[in-house]
Each structure stands twice: as C-alpha cells, then as structure tokens.
Image (spheres, rainbow, N blue to C red):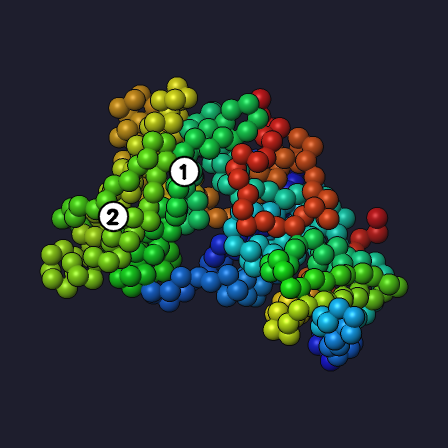
C-alpha cells in the first residue's frame, strides 16, 4: 500500500490471534531517519483511543521505522481505528514535510 | 522577551496566533460553517481543520514576520472541547514543537478566553462571564484558581441559540448567534418564554425544548415573527445571565465584569450587563469579535503566562481531553 510521497507504507494483512481470538493488524511506516520516526511516534502516541473498550494499539520505533500494532474484538472497530490513525499519520507527515527537518538539538 | 504561538481548534473555529509580551503579532482563523438547519459534527469539523491548519500556520508566521527559531513556546488547546478537532490540532502542535525544538504547553480553553480578556481590557480582577456555544460559566479568581461560581446545569447559552437557529433555518454564516442578534433588532413583540435560574446556576434545555416545539406553530399561526422570537429568546437568556453574574458580584464584592466567549460579542448582552453594572457602580469590560470568538492568540496568551511561571507539558502528558474544568489549573501566574 503506497500512500505518501516520499514515504512508502508496508502493512500486513489482518490476522486472528489464535490464543486470544482477537483481530490483529500490523503497520510499518518507514521514515527517512530514526529521529523523524521518533517525532511521529511522540506526536501520535499521547491521545487515548476514543473508544474505551474493544481496541488497543501499541506504537514503537525500531531503526527508522514506526510500527503500530492493533488488537481488536471486531473488524468494524479495527477499521475505524486504523482509518483514523492513517488520517492522523498523514497530517503528521505533511507537517514534517512543510516544517521539517527537525532542528539539531 | 517571550514569544508564544497558540493553536486553537476545539469547536468549529481553527485559529493560530502569535503573542510577544502582550502584543498580538498575528491571529489568523478559519470557521467551519454548515448549511442552515445543520450543526457541526466532530469528524466533519476535524476534517475541515485538517484541510486548512497548515496554511493557517504558515499565515501566522508570515503575518508576524517570524521564523520558527523566534518562537519560545508552542501552546495548544488541551481541552475542553470536541475530541476529533482537538486531536487534529494537537498533532500539529506536538509535531512542530519537536521539529523546532521548542517546549510544548497544553492550555485550558476557558483560561485562554479569560487571559485574553484580561490582556485586551486590562480589567484588574473582574467577575468573568464566559459564554459560548460550548460553555456558560461565571468565574472569579481566588487564591490561585479560577473558581466557577455559577454555570449552566445542562447546555451552554450559545448552544441554545445555535440550536434555535437550526429550527427556523437561520444561516450559520458568519455564525448563527450573529444572525439571531441582527434579527432580534427587528423584533418588537415579547413572547413569554421559560426563565430558569437556579441559585447561582442557569438551565437552558427547558427554554430550548419549549421554543423548538412552539416556534413553528407560533410562526405559522402568525402569532409572532421569527424576529420576535429571536428578540424574546435573547431578552430571556441574557437576563438570566445578568442575574447570575450579579449574584456572583455580590458574593465577591466585585466592581468589574468581564464578558468573554463567542456569545460575548453580542451587543444586546453587553448592553443589558451594562445596565446592571451601572446600577451597582461597577465597570463592564468586553472584547470584539477578534478575541471573543475562539482564536489562537488567546491560547498563546494563556500559554505566555503559564510558560513564564514555569509550566511545560511533556509530550507523553499532552493528550487532549473533552472535559477540563476551569478550576483544575493552578493559576501560578497571579497572586
């Protein structure tokens, strides 16, 4: 799935975790640098899911890739959360494109 | 010298403003306006903000003639307000704070209004009436907190006006409240409506239900015009607000009133409050639509005060919240 220029997004298909019975979705977003992936992580992680139950997600950075892992009870709830996240991600990326790169600290 | 940029988007206005030591350097804003008869929904509002926010940010910097390096602090609305729009704005604030290497500051929207009102009017220690589409509170400063003396027990006065406008399909451009005010000037017949003050508090859901139900009947029977209804609604709800403001002033021994929030633009409300103030020998303060309507500079101003008194928001703690009481913040910048 290629979505933003110059970033390419790789996503795995949704899987059902055999142990928990929950639907899982993994998203890996490559950034030009570890620093930029971390900027995105710290912008996207503070807010809680609007829906309290039935969905959770974990964000992490490894190298220059932002990884997101969702776990949901139902496909519908998963879809809403992933779509919302992608909107937010694209806003953060666009902000970084217009106002970046990050300053040297 | 301290320069703060403030991001605001908790309802249908998205504004970004820059303040340097009490001077407003820029304050661009956009409003999401829905067709007559429709209110604004969270996801549509967020989509609107998302579409314009980066343009407004560029404007704020250009109009102030500043570069990101000139900014000392990035302030944004932490809450209260609508969830999706708040997140949209917070995302950009967090991102630029990191890109520019500047500290972040989450601001209470209500306190933004108060601090802007204080800056513009230079009121010393007023009883504050904060009235908007989302909030209705009477606030007084005491011992490091903005204390809520009275408030609506259900909906905000602006919400009541906005929803009445929808019933009779008044235009939302530039805002339903503005159009109600213009129509009210042409009203002449006072229609009796429920008046609900409960001690220090007010209630608007009853008058709204009544007028929603009765409006179309009264209009089609020719009992009154839409202008008469606008007039009657304003007279009633504004009188309620004047009553609870006066009650708070009496409790606090206050000689100043400051009206903030979008409904504060209403000249009839200012006039009625002015009459009460005159009777008590008190002074009335109000700002114009640049600052009573939600804007970025008010967040920058509250941010300026907070930042200079030592506040900073860590990124992990920068989550937005739909509910955020005015008295939750310790007002460390006042005695």
Crowding at label 1, few (<14), some or many (≥20) Cα neighbours within 10 Å?
many
Residue at 35% across, 22% down: B250
Chain bearing tag 2 is B
Name the one closer to the observer, A78 or A7.
A78
Does B193 sit above or below residue B327? below
Left/right placement of residue B238 relative to residue B320 reads left
Residue at 65% across, 40% down: B3
Residue at 20% across, 62% down: B216
Chain bearing tag 1 is B
Residue at 60% across, 31% down: B330
Q: Which mark is residue B20?
A: none
Residue A31 visible to an observer of this rendering:
no
User: Which label lies toward us, 1 or 2?
Assistant: 1
Residue that protrudes farthest toward the left in the picture = B222
The image quarter containing residue B4 is top right
Residue ID for mark 2: B233
Does A49 sit above or below residue B306? below
Residue ID for mark 1: B151
Location of residue A10 in the rendering, given as x and y in whole percent from the top left corner: 78, 76
**SS of the residue under disc 2:** helix
Name the one closer to the observer, A66 or B30.
A66
Does B85 sit above or below residue B285? below
State the quadrant of the N terminus of chain B. Answer: top right
**SS of the residue under disc 1:** strand
Count of number-bearing discs = 2
Left/right placement of residue B149 relative to residue B168 reads right
Q: Earlier in the sequence, mark 1 or mark 2?
A: 1
CB-based contact (under 8 Å), mark 1 and mark 2: no
Location of residue B207 in the rendering, given as x and y in whole percent from the top left corner: 27, 48
């Amino acid at each position: 799935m290629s979505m933003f220029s110059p970033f390419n997004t790789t996503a795995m298909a949704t899987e059902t975790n055999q142990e928990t019975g929950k639907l899982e979705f993994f998203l890996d977003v490559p950034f030009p640098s570890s620093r930029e992936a971390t900027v995105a992580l710290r912008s996207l992680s503070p807010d809680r899911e609007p829906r309290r139950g039935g969905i959770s997600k974990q964000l992490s950075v490894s190298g220059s890739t932002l990884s997101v892992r969702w776990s949901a009870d139902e496909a519908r709830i998963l879809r809403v959360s992933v779509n919302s996240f992608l909107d937010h991600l694209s806003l953060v990326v666009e902000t970084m494109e217009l106002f970046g790169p990050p300053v040297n600290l | 010298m301290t320069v703060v940029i403030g991001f605001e988007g908790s309802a249908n206005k998205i504004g970004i403003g820059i303040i340097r030591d009490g001077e407003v350097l820029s304050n661009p804003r956009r409003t999401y306006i829905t067709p007559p008869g429709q209110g604004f929904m969270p996801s549509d509002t967020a989509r609107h903000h998302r579409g314009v926010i980066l343009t407004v940010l560029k404007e704020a910097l250009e109009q102030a003639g500043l570069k990101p390096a000139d900014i000392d602090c990035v302030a944004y609305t932490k809450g209260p307000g609508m969830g999706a729009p708040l997140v949209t704005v917070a995302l950009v604030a967090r991102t630029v704070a990191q890109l520019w290497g500047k500290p972040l500051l989450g601001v209470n929207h209500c306190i933004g209004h108060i601090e802007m009102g204080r800056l513009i009017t230079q009121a010393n220690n007023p009883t504050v009436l904060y009235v908007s589409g989302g909030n209705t509170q009477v606030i007084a400063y005491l011992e490091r907190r903005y204390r809520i003396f009275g408030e609506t027990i259900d909906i905000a006065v602006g919400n009541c006006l906005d929803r009445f406008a929808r019933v009779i399909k008044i235009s939302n451009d530039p805002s339903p409240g503005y159009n109600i005010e213009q129509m009210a000037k042409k009203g002449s017949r006072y229609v009796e409506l429920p008046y609900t003050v409960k001690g220090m508090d007010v209630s608007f859901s009853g008058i709204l239900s009544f007028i929603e139900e009765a409006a179309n009947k009264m209009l089609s029977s020719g009992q009154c015009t839409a202008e008469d209804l606008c007039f009657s609604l304003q007279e009633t709800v504004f009188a309620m607000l004047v009553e609870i403001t006066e009650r708070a002033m009496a409790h606090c021994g206050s000689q100043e009133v400051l009206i903030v929030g979008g409904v504060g633009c209403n000249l009839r409300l200012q006039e009625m409050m002015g009459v009460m103030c005159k009777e008590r020998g008190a002074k009335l303060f109000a700002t114009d639509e640049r600052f009573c309507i939600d804007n970025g500079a008010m967040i920058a101003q509250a941010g300026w005060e907070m930042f200079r008194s030592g506040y900073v928001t860590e990124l992990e703690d920068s989550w937005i919240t739909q509910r955020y009481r005015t008295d939750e913040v310790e007002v460390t910048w006042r005695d």
